[in-house]
Structure formats: structure tokens, C-alpha cells
Image (cartoon, rainbow, N blue to C red):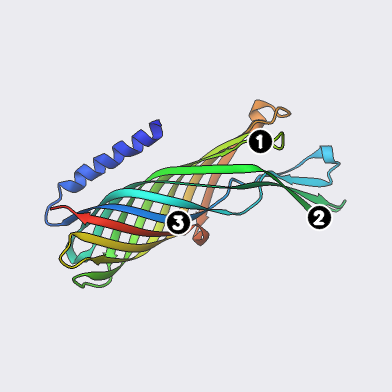
Amino acid sequence: MKKCTTILLLFLFVFSLNAQVEHSSKAITVSIGLENHRQLFSKSVEDDDFNGGISFSKFSDGYARDIVVAIGSKKIIEDDNYHAWSIFGSGSSWDRNDVFDLQDSLGNTIDELSFFAGKVSSYAVGLRYTYGLSLTHNENLNFLIGFRGELHERFYSAPATEGIGFDTNANEVSLRAFAVPEMHYIVPGKPLLLSFRIGLPVASLGLDSQNVSNPALTLRQQRNGGLSFDLFGFKDSLFEVSFGYFLK
């Protein structure tokens, strides 16, 4: 709750700065979209209890699709370029599958065992800024390329199901940069703006932590995390439609 309040206050601050800029068209925007993201971190360890013959991957690799909702402001400036700020939230859920790799004495995988172990739920909140550069200069319909910076935090919850697996919670804080091709259309004679855009990840820097409530492990062993860096992770693309209303 405190994190959401902090992000909201940051947004209100940048929005108040935005509102004081003159000689521009300002709009309130609401966006909805779909975004792919990696499922809960894949962790692989070898367990001597299985005589070295099985490696255990806590979660299967894969992608989930979030529904993303954002509210913000957009300011069209000279040459049909724009500044935009927004806060957003997203969420999704998927089946959790624990995976065992059966290996021979040389470490070669000879079989894979997978079983359903419940649902994983995920949600994220964040703040983003976009600068849009117009490639065309028409009165109503224009094509642009945007450059977006984003700060967001994602939370995961994966409770054990009927004694299978262990309760798991995780979170990830990241900074991300996007290239954002966009088309926006100003409705003739109306204070309305319609936009379609694709967010293409260019780079991301993240810090994640995870807690697995396994009583066989010490408290320190139950917690792990790390730093991640990714370039051109286009599988994490965002597809978004935005509606805007120009302020008088």
C-alpha cells in the first residue's frame, strides 16, 4: 500500500509540473493493453537426496500475459511531438508446474517429469515517462516513435496446493527502457485523442528476491535473489490502446 501511495504522489508531482507548461495541448489519458512477461523466476538446483540423478527446477520456464491499465497525461508540443507521464497497474495468473529432469550418471537428461502444483498470481505497479517524436505532421493522423523510461515493481504469490510444493513469494524491482512506435488520431471537431502503440523493450535492469517456505531449509537458504540485466527482450513487448480527452 505504501509503495502504491509513493508512486501516486510521484505522478501527481510530475503532473503538476506538466500542467504549468504553456503553448501546448494537454490531455488526460486512459490506456489498456496486454504485456508479455517472464513467469516466476526459474530456479534450478541439484539435490543429493536423489543420488545426483535428478535436477529440480522449481518453476517451469514460460511467459504470462498481463492486462495493463494506465492513467496519465499527454502534452502535445511543437512539431506534433509530445511528453507523457502515467502510473499503471497490471496483473495475471498462470498454472505452476514443478519440473524434474531425470539424468543418467553422465548428467544427460533422459526424461522430464512435470506436475501441476497450483496457481501463481502476479501484479505490478509502476511509473513511466515517454517522449514522442512525430514522424509526420498532419492535422489529425500522425505516426510517431516514442522513447520510454519506466520504474516498476512486480509481486508474485505461489501458495502450495494440497501439500504439493511450498508457499513462495517474490518481488522484482526494475528500470526499463522502451522504443514505442505509435499512431495517434485526433478526432476532427472533438477534444478526443485515440492512440495505438507497441512498447519494444530495449534494456532492463532488475533486482529480484524470492522466499520459499521450505522447512527443510534454513531461513537464509529459503531466501535468495539477484541482479538481472537484459537487452532487446522483445518477448516482453506491450500492445496498448489509449484514449485521451483534451483539457480546455
Residue 145: x, y in percent? 33, 65
For badge 1, the amino acid type reads Ala
Disc 2: which residue: 111
Residue 116 in view, yes or no: yes
Residue wearing tag 1? 160
Where 169 falls versus 150 (above or below)?
Answer: above
Label 2, secondary structure: give it.
Answer: strand
Residue 171 marker = none
Q: Nearer the viewer, residue 121 or 210?
A: 121
Q: The disc labelled 3 sits on which kind of residue?
A: Leu
Q: With respect to residue 192, does 59 lie above or below? A: above
Q: Secondary structure under badge 1?
A: loop
Residue plotted at (49% across, 45% down): 206
Left or right, residue 20 beside residue 181: left
Decide which of 146, 29 is in the foreground and name it: 29
Give the labeled residue for mark 3: 34
Q: CA distance from mark 3 to mark 1?
A: 28 Å
The x, y position of residue 237, in whole percent, is 47, 59
Badge 2 local density, few (<14 within 10 Å), some, or many (20+)? few
